Image (cartoon, rainbow, N blue to C red):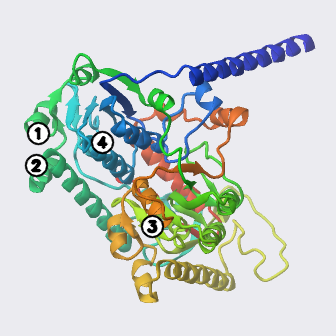
């Protein structure tokens, strides 16, 4: 038996060695045999899955494992292609992905800049929502010159909606008691557990958010398709539309699939994929003065960053972000820091640690420009507050200046199954965070004192960083989430736009000429080699392909909501809001 085990392990080791050796050979070959981009080339980009808003995987990892392109990959490809005389157009596959509205706006901005240079962008889709909403995917496609739809497709331009699960009734049946407090009325991260339905403040907040995002989508489609806004509204109320109805309503231009859409570029057009194109011409912003790029994605926590294999979300560890800012601040070649945030918040202590790191960089004379992705709420906004400038897309979920704290009490569950428990404590509040008993009156007094202090500190940080008086901060606070468009009117955001807008601001703040390119350098340096490959293997998505996108989005939202409920007391978190 021992001989067989040794032989098996030797075989596995040999296979791993051959894979690594082969991957290294491919990498060396690709580095020395770059393909020349021919004239009249069209870049083909698949946007049927959402690009990750984070750093691009590099080196051996990308050779050994299939990885979705990052948002920076896609934006960089479109930017490079726009300036490349060999590139004549873009061919975009649009699908029912879970791309956020703010990220769609960033992609739309890039497509608009590409078209402004006299080049064509063509979108094709099997369908815009198969028995589901296709509003977001159509909004993305509308930025292109032409839209192709296959014969059996439909245009599910049905508007926007939010569905929020409420588990209070289930918890009551199980004997679980939610014991939470929040500041203030719009801070609804715990409502999933504490309520049986939508509260009046929650409904007010969600209605305002949806109206803001819907207005942006409506006006964008109207401008792109040259249809009156009122007519777009009428179309939405009649949707979903069949193929013929979509043609008559001028929502699509042609009926056909990828081959037909590709043929519209003419018989001499050549096609190249996103990864091949970037590998051939190189990513953008790799020469010139250095600007540091730091990402904060997913839930904010103390300690190091870690990817969540359950939800596919990345985490932002305070230790790693502090190190990134320290390295960028100490690097004399770094002229400014571009801080990309896509986070619903997390630990208040971790957020304060990251805030201090951002503040130190600012005080050291390194300009910090924040670019907000799909969401920068609660702790995600807290860490942005000390930056020199804050940039957000009109649809970015912003603010949620508030705090929620508490616990789920499982004592009732144990009683129902005949279990008991015993405890010994020394100190009046030693059992304060026991999962078997609710807060006592004295413990609740201390809990209120803690969250009052965190809430006051949060507002103070925002007032200091945004140069706002207490009244203005209070009007923007109370735990309310704003669209980026509305947040700008509240003084929480300086300018509307995406990473390119933020990069232009970083260059201007650092005194770099607008027409000069820069070296956009990631901090901390990305993981490479075997460790990154193993991480990819373990954390790679697998369940996504097995579930409908609507079900997956609902599941992810529920899991994220449960993660927020189980976060430590005094958490700066917002509820998962994903308009569909």
* First along the sequence among labels 3 and 2: 2
Residue 257 shows up from this direction: yes
Secondary structure category for the residue under label 2: loop
Choose mark 3 or mark 1, whichever is in front. 3
Whole-Å distance between the Cαs marked 2 and 4? Answer: 22 Å
Label 3, label 1: how many angstroms apart (C-alpha)?
Answer: 37 Å
Judge by depth and name the residue closer to the eye, 526 or 454.
526
Contact between marks 2 and 4 (CB within 8 A): the answer is no
Q: Alpha-carbon distance for marks 1 and 2? A: 8 Å
Circle 4 residue: 114
For marks 3 and 1, the one nearer the N-term is 1
Q: How many marks?
A: 4
First reached walking from the N terminus: tag 3 or tag 4: 4
Do the CB atoms of the residues marked 3 and 4 lie less than 8 Å apart? Answer: no
Label 4 with label 1: CB-CB less than 8 Å? no
Secondary element at tag 4: helix
């Amino acid at each position: 038996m021992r001989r067989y085990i040794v032989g098996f392990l030797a075989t596995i080791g040999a296979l791993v060695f051959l894979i690594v050796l082969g991957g290294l050979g491919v990498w060396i070959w690709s580095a020395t045999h770059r393909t020349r981009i021919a004239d009249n080339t069209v870049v083909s980009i698949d946007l049927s899955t959402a690009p990750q808003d984070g750093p691009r995987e590099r080196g051996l990892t990308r050779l050994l494992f299939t990885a979705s392109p990052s948002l920076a990959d896609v934006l960089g490809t479109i930017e490079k292609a726009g300036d490349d005389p060999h590139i004549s157009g873009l061919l975009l596959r649009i699908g029912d992905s879970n791309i956020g509205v703010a990220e769609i706006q960033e992609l739309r901005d890039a497509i608009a800049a590409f078209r402004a240079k006299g080049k064509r962008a063509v979108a094709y889709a099997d369908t815009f929502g198969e028995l589901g909403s296709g509003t977001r995917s159509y909004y993305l496609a509308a930025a292109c010159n032409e839209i192709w739809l296959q014969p059996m497709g439909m245009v599910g331009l049905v508007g926007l909606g939010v569905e929020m699960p409420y588990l209070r009734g289930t918890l009551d049946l199980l004997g679980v008691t939610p014991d939470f407090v929040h500041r203030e009325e719009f801070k609804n991260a715990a409502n999933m557990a504490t309520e049986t339905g939508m509260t009046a403040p929650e409904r007010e907040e969600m209605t305002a958010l949806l109206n803001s995002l819907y207005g942006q989508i409506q006006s964008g489609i109207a401008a792109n398709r040259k249809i009156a806004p009122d007519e777009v509204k009428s179309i939405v109320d009649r949707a979903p539309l069949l193929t013929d109805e979509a043609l008559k309503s001028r929502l699509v231009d042609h009926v056909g699939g990828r081959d037909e859409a590709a043929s519209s570029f003419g018989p001499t057009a050549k096609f190249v994929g996103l990864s091949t194109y970037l590998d051939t011409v190189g990513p953008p912003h790799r020469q010139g003065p250095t600007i540091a790029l730091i990402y904060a994605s997913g839930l904010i926590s103390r300690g190091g960053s870690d990817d969540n294999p359950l939800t596919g979300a990345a985490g932002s560890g305070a230790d790693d972000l502090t190190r990134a800012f320290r390295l960028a601040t100490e690097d004399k070649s770094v002229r400014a820091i571009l801080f990309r945030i896509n986070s619903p918040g997390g630990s208040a202590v971790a957020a304060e640690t990251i805030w201090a790191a951002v503040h130190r960089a600012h005080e050291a004379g390194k300009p910090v420009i924040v670019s907000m992705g799909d969401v920068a709420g609660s702790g995600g906004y807290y860490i942005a507050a000390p930056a020199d400038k804050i940039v957000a897309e009109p649809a970015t979920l912003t603010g949620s200046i508030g705090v929620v704290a508490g616990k789920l009490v499982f004592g009732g569950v144990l009683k129902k199954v005949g279990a008991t428990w015993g405890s010994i404590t020394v100190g009046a509040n030693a059992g304060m965070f026991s999962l078997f008993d609710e807060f006592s009156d004295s413990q609740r007094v201390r809990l209120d004192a803690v969250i009052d202090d965190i809430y006051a500190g949060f507002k103070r940080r925002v007032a200091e960083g945004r140069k706002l008086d207490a009244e203005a901060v209070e009007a923007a606070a109370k735990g309310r989430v704003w669209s980026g468009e509305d947040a700008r009117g509240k003084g929480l955001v300086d300018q509307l736009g995406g990473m390119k807008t933020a990069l232009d601001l970083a260059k201007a703040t650092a005194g770099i000429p607008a027409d000069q390119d820069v070296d956009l350098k990631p901090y901390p340096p990305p993981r490479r080699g075997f460790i990154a490959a193993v991480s990819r293997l373990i954390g790679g998505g697998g369940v996504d392909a097995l579930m409908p996108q609507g079900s997956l989005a609902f599941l992810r939202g529920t899991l994220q909501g449960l993660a927020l409920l189980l976060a430590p007391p005094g958490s700066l978190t917002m509820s998962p809001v994903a308009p569909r």
